[in-house]
Image (spheres, rainbow, N blue to C red):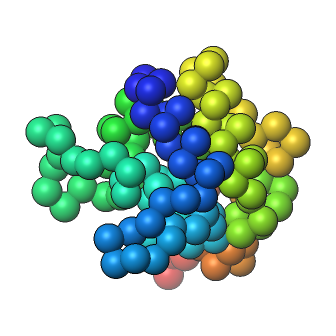
Amino acid sequence: MNTEAIHFVAKAILDQNTVLPNGERLVFDMKNWCGTACCIAGWTNVLIPDDENARQDEHDLFAAERKLGLTRTQALELFSPALTISYSDVTPQQAADVLLHLADTGSVDWGELKNPLGPLGPKAEGHPTFPRGKRRVARR
């Protein structure tokens, strides 16, 4: 785990002073995740340049996982958690706290925001969900 990189991303998210090359200020917003620069993975990919380990056409989440030195489980819990609130309601402070806790303990802990029942459902945030268990096929 790259604790230095995790601390760097946490501080940048908390400070909210990152300016993109086009002059726009980067704004933290977990509502727009996967392919955007607003979520934790997006901030990681904007702030930490690719290195010799980068793979062509690597998905943003996998690139951020690699850059932060996370396990797949840590990455999933950090980048796409099941929360009791909408992703768009996660504040920079809450995200930074989770990142700092991860750097200090190796554990992703969203605290009271974590939904013990799992994701909110298929309509939550407009993100697709994947069915659990075996798919049932009607027999003719």
Where does residue 39 sit, x and y in percent of width and height? 54, 60
**Snapshot quadrant of residue 20:** bottom left
Depth check, front residue: 23 or 39: 23
Is residue 124 shown to the viewer in this render? yes
Depth check, front residue: 43 or 33: 43
Residue for point 19% across, 61% down: 57
Q: Residue furthest top?
A: 105
Residue for point 54% across, 48% down: 12
Left or right: 105 in relation to 66: right
Left or right: 71 in relation to 52: right
Q: Establish if 114 lies above or below 83.
A: above
Quadrant assignment for the N terminus: top left
Q: Establish if 26 lies above or below 90.
A: below
Residue for point 12% across, 39% down: 52
Where does residue 106 sit, x and y in percent of width and height? 57, 21
Depth check, front residue: 76 or 67: 67
- Numbered-mark total: 0
**Snapshot quadrant of residue 109:** top right
Is residue 122 shown to the viewer in this render? no
Where does residue 13 sit, x and y in percent of width and height? 59, 51
Q: Establish if 17 lies above or below 107.
A: below
